[in-house]
Amino acid sequence: MTHNTTLKRIIFAIMILLSVSGVNGARKTVFEPDTLRVLRNPLQGWVMYLGRTWDENFWNERGYDNMKIAGDTASVRVSDYASCAYIRTSWASFEPEEGKYAWNDPDNRLMKLLRSVRDRGLRLAFRIVVDGRDQGQNTPQYVFDAGAEGYYDPKNPGKNLSPYPDDPVFQEKYSKFFREFAKHFDNPEEVEFIDAYSLGKWGESHSMIYKDNNNKGKVFDWVINLATDCFKRVPMLIHYHRMLGDPADDGWGSVPADAETLITTAANKGFSLRHDAFGMHGYYQDWEKEMARKWNFRRPIIMEGGWITGAHHRYWRDPSGLYREGHAEDVRKGEYDAAAEARVNMMDFRINDETRSWFEDAFPLVKGFVAHGGYRLYPVSVETPESSRAGKKVNVTTSWENIGWGYCPTNIPQWNQKYKVGIALLNEAGNPVKTVVEHRSDLSTWLLEQGATHTTSFPLKGIKPGKYRWAVAIVDTTNGNRPSLEMAVDSSLLLKNGWLPCGEISIN
């Protein structure tokens, strides 16, 4: 912790103490927002990527635990800045033989890698690729042995067999696998999200090759319905790519007539949105920007940058003219600005040079997204009574704000408004003796500069006379009303159990 960080936290604490006053037997506690601390809330923050060939030792081998910052002798751990780790891997890596699943093998390399992520407190995210073009055979061989028809990578004739997505044998085998995958990974405590439409080239849902192109809509419905049926608690993403499910060879072109309809259908069924070309002005254009605006604060948006600066991917040829050759920081700034415009909830640390670029070339932007990106919720003030008689009802007034440009997506079906404002009375040990949930609180409506205030009736029935502390938190109503979402307040003010004390009361 730097000297400036320590000083700022002391100032926060002093301001809080100075803001406490007694008015008509009530005490009002005012809090200042913390813009420094990395909050590991779901669907918010930085997503670090994992290489599909990596093992659990990559943290040291690839420098992820010793990431340098430009102009600073100190180094940091990438995992300390991320909320989750995302891996794009193959169906074959999870099920090399029919019914032989990686998650049932404790010695499996992939599972060891994922466990190393969980050991650091990060959640997981997945894209399971079946198309083998430009990669390798991502679909298990047993699927083709069972009769599924497919095609070879045009660049490697006779190699890397991929299935036609409208082949019935493929759909049967994939559906079976996907349902088993969901049984294991539909767990929001461990999994952040899943890219649930991962067909097409690189699993990006474009450049599709069908037996019959007229089956585009049928395949789309099959994939969407399968995912919706399998994942009830973990958010699902769909790529708002204009060529979603389209057989256009180059993966790009004019907007198909059904593009918006397909994305709208998926979003209405509970899918959240992502796009993989942020910062690429030739690909992320007005149509994509309008799609983001349409769904802002209705569905969260996850971004991925499009240019690969570490591989010299000719980013300086971007039609915007904003990127100088040899200046990766220009690309990072382009991605950041596009993310802010789209109000994204999550940004990406992609593998190797791309991750190093964020820390070495654009670390102020990393801290900028921590401070302003996604959602950062905090209580502006809490007004609590200082005394009452046992058995009475008292009122507690809480005011909340969001200092992030995104939103807390409690309105998605997988969350179903499970996060709410919680108010508790704590005993001397700091444990709740009574908790009341403000069920009227809708965190998805707390937007930048548009917070909420609630006056909550708190019954003291059953509470023994004595002295107690008031506390607030954002609780998970599906998990015993325990504090769940991290609030953007100085962590030194929080109890270990996540409650934020905000006054005392004597019950006579």
Image (spheres, rainbow, N blue to C red):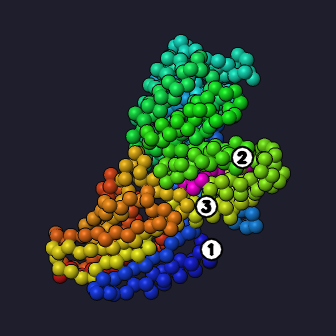
Q: Amino acid at mark 3?
A: Phe
Nearer the camera: disc 1 or disc 2: 2
| Circle 3 residue | 369
Q: Residue at x 29, y 69 (%)?
A: 456
Mark 2 → mark 3, Cα distance in angstroms? 19 Å
> At numbered mark 2, what does the secondary structure look like: helix, strand or loop?
loop
| Residue 13 appears left or right of 138 | left
| Circle 1 residue | 2
Q: Amino acid at mark 2?
A: Met
Q: Which quadrant of the figure contains the C terminus?
A: bottom left
Pinpoint residue 487: horizontal percent, then vertical percent. Answer: 46, 65
> At numbered mark 1, what does the secondary structure look like: helix, strand or loop?
loop
| Residue 465 appears left or right of 331 | left
Pinpoint residue 420: horizontal percent, then vertical percent. Answer: 36, 59
Circle 1 packing at 10 Å, graded few (<14), some (14-19), many (20+), is few
Above or below, 164 relative to 413:
above
Mark 1 → mark 2, Cα distance in angstroms? 36 Å
Label 2 vs 3, first from the N-terminus? 2
Pinpoint residue 464: horizontal percent, then vertical percent. Answer: 17, 74
Query: 416 or 215, which is in the foreground?
Result: 215
Q: Which quadrant of the figure contains the N terminus?
A: bottom right
Q: Residue furthest right?
A: 325
Mark 3 → mark 1, Cα distance in angstroms? 19 Å
Q: Is residue 54 magenta?
A: no
> At numbered mark 3, what does the secondary structure look like: helix, strand or loop?
helix
- Residue 76 appears in the rendering: no
Query: 287 or 28, which is in the foreground?
Result: 287
Q: Which residues are the magenta region?
A: 342-353
Label 1 vs 2, first from the N-terminus? 1
| Circle 2 residue | 280
Nearer the camera: disc 3 or disc 1: 3
Above or below, 64 relative to 227:
below
